[in-house]
Amino acid sequence: MKIINPATEEIITELKEDSKESLSKKMTLLKQGQKKWHSIPLAERVHILQKFSELLKKNLEELAGILTSEVGKPLQQARNEVNGACARIKWLTENAERYLSDEVMSNQPDMQEKIVYEPLGVVCNISAWNYPFLVGTNVFVPALLAGNAVMYKPSEFSSLTGLEIEKLIKEAGVPDDVFQVAIGAGATGQTLLELPFDGYYFTGSYKTGQYIYEKVAPKMVPCQLELGGKDPLYIADDIADIKSVAAATADGAFYNNGQSCCSVERIYVHENIFYQYIEEFVKEVKTYMLGLPNEEGVYISALTREPQLHIVDAQVKDAIAKGAKVLTGGKRAQRKGYYYEPTVLINVNHNMSVMREESFGPLIGIMKVKDDKEAAELMNDTEYGLTAGVYSSAQHRAEKVLAQINAGTGYWNCCDRVSAALPWSGRKHSGIGATLSHAGLRAFTHPKAYHLKG
């Protein structure tokens, strides 16, 4: 399997993909190691995962460099991702005892009722390339804390990072028979679906997630899907500072080259401030430096996957053909590598794919609306339901709009953010289940009810 640098199109290295035989051996190893891992006290498992976080910090520059080389994100954003993973590990490890320990619900003289949170067993984590440290941390850290063994499959586009994660997690003290990495592309993923795991946790596209869900359904084991989004944002006409809001929301749309499931993917602006907002938004986007990801000051770099260039370009051409206007960008950058200019479209509507289908690139459509009611209706006009945001000076106004939106996360005066303390969940085509928060820790357990009569 060739590992390609998307910024230069050069081959970094080649890796040997796992075979059915090697994956079966790894599965057997994990089944043997899981019970022993669960018998280790939770406090010790917590300590091991905290040491893993310390190793991430210690090796920050090397890890960021490897990540940038294979996915193309600007180097500073790669550093931010590693640091973000450490912050999530901090919350998960500090709260593991609170949410994974036995929970006494009633303690009467003749009857005690309690819940015990037992591990699922051996779980399969099929992960994503856009934030491999973050989306990986969402799954394998709480899974290990809960006493599970983990088969971790990094995306074929972030395999080098996946191998670094394996190296450091074992250096921290996770045994070889508790954490294994599966290397490969689609065929490897298919084999994993056929093995007898006790739970599946996938991060990626709706199409692949749907396939996994249908494939493993007969096993009747937990299957969580963290999928894509077409995340809407509404800019109300009472915002205090149009310039700062435009800058913040442009960052929400274009950070990580727009390759985030919670990136702002469509913006609705109240007609009273539409043109002022557009002016400031485009000014901000035009300041974004495009270049090699390891160049100082670069904000927009290469997309990770070459096919995504064609998806973004097709959305732009479809929009233009249906009456949209390009205010900046609108084409592939004329240079080696998978670069697309940051693109802003207006005069868009919901007959255009750019307002309905996930872009996952440096592209945004901005649409004028007459009031909050029209904004809420358009925000809900989607098959996805991951995040939605409102910028307004009035919290009650924002929450009134957000209460109408069928999405797992609502933002007021912020966007494109995740907190380890809050559940990360999608609705409709954005997925099923939750990671992070107490829900994400317990997602890797079977609750067992005990009725203890004295």
Image (spheres, helix red, strand yellow):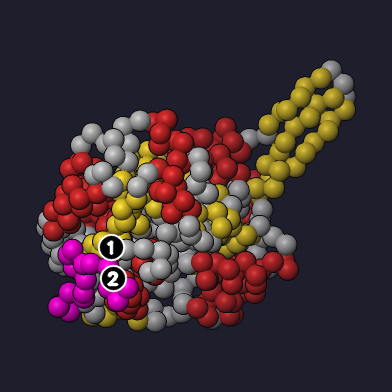
Pick the residue in front: 113 or 394.
394
Q: Is residue 49 magenta?
A: no
Q: Is residue 227 placed above or below 23 in the rendered structure?
A: above
The answer to which image quadrant residue 171 occupies is: bottom left
Q: Position of residue 318 (x, y in %)?
A: 33, 75
Q: Position of residue 242 (x, y in %)?
A: 20, 41
The answer to which image quadrant residue 338 occupies is: bottom left
Q: Looking at the image, tell me whether mark 1 or mark 2 is earlier in sequence order.
A: 2
The amino acid marked with disc number 2 is: Gly
- Contact between marks 1 and 2 (CB within 8 A): the answer is yes
| 116 with respect to 203 (left or right) | right
Q: Residue at x 44, y 59 (%)?
A: 229
Q: Residue at x 71, y 43 (%)?
A: 447
Q: Could you tell me if residue 334 is visible in this image?
A: yes
The amino acid marked with disc number 1 is: Asn
In which quadrant of the rendered image does the C terminus lie? top right
Q: Secondary structure at mark 1?
A: loop
Pick the residue in front: 292 or 143.
292
Pick the residue in front: 196 or 289.
289
Q: Secondary structure at mark 2?
A: loop
10 Å crowding of disc 2: few (<14), some (14-19), many (20+): few
Report the residue marked by disc 2: 323
Pick the residue in front: 52 or 286.
286
Q: Which residues are magenta?
A: 320-336
Q: Which mark is residue 372?
A: none
